[in-house]
Image (tube, rainbow, N blue to C red):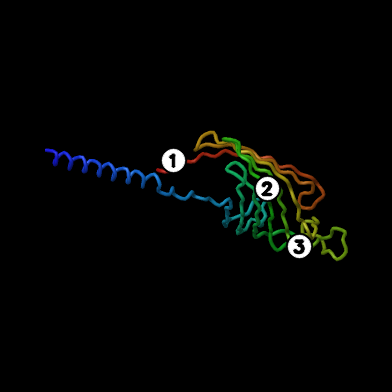
Amino acid sequence: MRKVLTTAVVAAAFASTAAYAADLKMVTKAPPAPVVESPWDVAFGAWLASDYNFRGVTQSAHQPAVGTYFEPRYNINKDLQLYIGAGGASIDFPNHAAAEIDFYGGIRPTFGKLALDFGVWYYWYPGGQCFNTGFAGCNASLLNGNVVKADVSFWEVYGKATYNLTDAFSFGGSLYYSPSVLNSGADGEYLAGTAKYVLPSNL
């Protein structure tokens, strides 16, 4: 009886020691390495249109146009993003400018469901010719009698706001201002409103 009892005690002690060793192994196991997300992001794309319209005015003389853009972004945190971008589009202007080249940059803060966007945009139209603007070396007037500068490049500042009411529905507005639209010397403001509804994925 004593021999059996001693064997049982030894077996129990061994089992207890083994269980403790297993627990110790689990406790001292190295935690998984944290996932490090890069603060950098990039957006890019291209488009094809039957008529390139900019705020209701054709930029391609009612002909097809193509464009592209590239936008690096830096996320300071989940609620604040900095960005710069460049893009290009084919155009057909009266001054025969070669293309529209865009440079822009800004900041996008987010406050809960409200997303804001503030920035500056430069529209560059290289390779243009002047038509009877009073400058030396200009061409004769256009067929409709209008005049045009060789360089119609200009810049503007903008502010945008979007409120995400639900995951599917959002609405907002934007305001743009330039002190010299199309390098005309005349200032201009453009105000727009937006609303978006995302259909369910099963549709």
For badge 2, the amino acid type reads Gly
Q: CA distance from mark 2 to mark 3?
A: 28 Å
Total numbered labels placed on residues in the image: 3
Say which residue label 2 marks: 106
Outermost residue, front side: 2
Which residue corresponds to the image point at 52% horizontal and 36% vertical from the top-left? Answer: 169
Q: Is residue 7 left or right of residue 197?
A: left
Residue 45, position in %: x, y?
A: 57, 56
Which residue corresponds to the image point at 68% horizontal and 56% vertical from the top-left? Answer: 102
In-front residue for pair 161/28: 28
Say which residue label 1 marks: 200
Q: Return the disc, 1 or 3, that comes first in the chain's sequence.
A: 3
Residue 27, position in %: x, y?
A: 39, 44
Q: CA distance from mark 1 to mark 3?
A: 47 Å
In-front residue for pair 64/153: 153
What is the quadrant of the C terminus in the image? top left
Does the image show residue 29? yes
Secondary element type, mark 3 = loop
For badge 1, the amino acid type reads Pro
For badge 3, the amino acid type reads Gly
Say which residue label 3 marks: 128
Q: Return the disc, 2 or 1, that comes first in the chain's sequence.
A: 2
What is the quadrant of the N terminus in the image? top left
For the residues labelled 1 and 3, say whether their Cβ atoms are less than 8 Å apart: no
Outermost residue, top side: 165
Q: Residue 100: name its quadrant.
A: bottom right
Please name which of the two marks, 1 or 3, marks the residue nearer to the observer: 1
Q: Residues within 10 Å of mark 2 (few under 14, many from 20)?
A: some
Residue 183, position in %: x, y?
A: 79, 53
Please name which of the two marks, 2 or 3, marks the residue nearer to the observer: 2
Task: Using the image, determine if residue 33 lies above or below residue 160.
Answer: below
